[in-house]
């Protein structure tokens, strides 16, 4: 972790910090609204409605439930991150900050920066310092990588033939990649079990969580990707008899590409790998339904929640300043 301020301390220049975080908040809302309009602009209202109605009610309900469970899982990762940083907060506060930051960050792209800036906006209000928020962001980023590796190892090693078909690699390369992913996760858990002092790389200091937190980190990371894959699987199953493990494989590959390219919301990347999996099936409708359920609905809810919370925070801040001024005048 970058060695900035000590946990719980405030960085220098609180006025400047408040101005910059307000600017970031406003820009995030504007950019989120633009992305929502741009993404919806690619489809007519009739297409959006038809894509959702084309799904059987049971499939649609299951896909929505899996999407909601994924965001709940992501909130749990933030909760773990705060515990690992030694700055636990009530789950309600964590869920509010995590959902807003991630619902916007998924669509904005460069999630570590975009969602990290929004997390900073919330968590510093609740007593965390810059270093604390940096630890949370790093923990969440590592969790995404570990979850991707863990689920990818399971998918590749359980069905290497499908992985060969999707990636075009030979069987030895596929097996080697699966074993490398599993080995990376095992190495992380082993270091968490044995190391007590932080790892130091030049000016950076990285403190690994204790083994129970590290194991929960891997488990929640993998569970999140499994839940998103299940959401996509329910949408695709409406038009094709595709297996869950196949969807997991292509989704892991797609998300690895998204992490490399930082494409907002994975636009075009997820579609391309799914079309590769089902080349003779019309998957446009299910993909629109999936994107609507997992990206657009949370983005709209996140923008609304962000606007409301910002209004509430500013109203409380104004009330506190008025109270202070009244007490000063009375004295």
Image: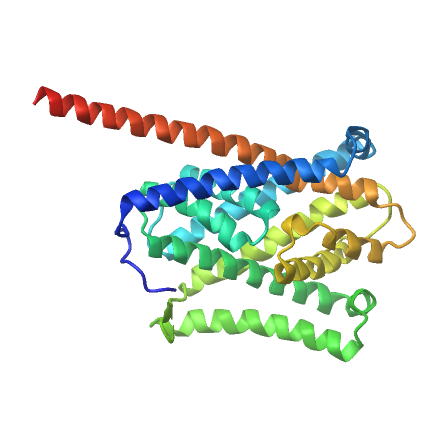
At 54% across and 72% down in the image, what residue appears? 186
At 57% across and 62% down in the image, what residue appears? 145
Q: Measuring from the top left, give residue 230's x and y in whole percent.
A: 70, 48
User: The C terminus lies in which quarter of the figure?
Assistant: top left
Q: How is the image coloured?
A: rainbow
- Is residue 322 visible to us here? yes
**Which residue is nearer to you in this view: 119 or 206?**
119
Q: Is residue 185 above or below residue 251?
A: below
**Which residue is nearer to you in this view: 100 or 91?**
100
Residue that extends furthest to the left in the rendered view of this protein = 331
Count of picture labels: 0
**Which residue is nearer to you in this view: 221 or 200?**
200
Q: Measuring from the top left, give residue 94's x and y in whole percent.
A: 43, 42
User: The N terminus lies in which quarter of the figure?
Assistant: bottom left
At 43% across and 37% down in the image, what residue appears? 92
At 74% across and 52% down in the image, what residue appears? 268
Q: Is residue 163 above or below residue 11?
A: below
Residue that extends furthest to the bottom in the rendered view of this protein = 172
**Which residue is nearer to you in this view: 327 or 57?**
327
Residue 104: quarter of image: top right
Q: Measuring from the top left, give residue 298's x and y in whole percent.
A: 60, 37
Image check: 126 left or right of 168? Answer: left
């Amino acid at each position: 972790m970058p060695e900035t301020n000590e946990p719980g301390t405030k960085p220098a220049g609180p006025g400047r910090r408040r101005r910059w975080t307000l600017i970031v908040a406003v820009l995030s809302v504007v950019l989120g609204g633009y992305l929502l309009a741009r993404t919806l602009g690619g489809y007519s209202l009739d297409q959006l409605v038809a894509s959702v109605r084309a799904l059987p009610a049971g499939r649609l309900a299951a896909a929505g439930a899996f999407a909601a469970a994924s965001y709940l899982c992501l909130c749990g990762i933030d909760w773990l991150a705060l515990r690992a940083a030694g700055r636990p907060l009530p789950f309600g506060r964590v869920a509010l900050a995590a959902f807003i930051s991630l619902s916007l960050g998924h669509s904005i792209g460069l999630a570590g920066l975009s969602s990290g800036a929004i997390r900073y906006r919330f968590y510093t209000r609740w007593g965390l310092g810059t270093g604390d928020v940096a630890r949370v962001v790093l923990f969440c980023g590592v969790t995404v990588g570990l979850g991707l590796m863990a689920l990818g190892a399971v998918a590749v090693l359980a069905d290497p033939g499908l992985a060969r078909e999707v990636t075009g690699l030979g069987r030895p390369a596929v097996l080697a990649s699966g074993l490398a992913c599993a080995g990376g996760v095992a190495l992380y858990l082993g270091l968490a079990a044995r190391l007590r002092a932080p790892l130091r790389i030049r000016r950076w200091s990285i403190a690994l969580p204790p083994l129970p937190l590290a194991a929960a980190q891997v488990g929640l990371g993998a569970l999140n990707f499994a839940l998103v894959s299940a959401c996509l699987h329910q949408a695709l199953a409406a038009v094709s008899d595709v297996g869950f493990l196949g969807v997991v494989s292509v989704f892991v590959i797609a998300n690895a590409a998204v992490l490399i390219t930082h494409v907002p919301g994975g636009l075009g990347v997820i579609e391309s790998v799914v079309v590769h999996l089902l080349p003779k099936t019309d998957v446009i409708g299910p993909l629109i339904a999936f994107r609507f359920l997992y990206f657009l609905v949370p983005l709209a809810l996140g923008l609304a929640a962000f606007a409301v919370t910002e209004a509430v925070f500013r109203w409380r801040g104004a009330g506190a300043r008025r109270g202070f001024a009244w007490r000063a005048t009375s004295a």
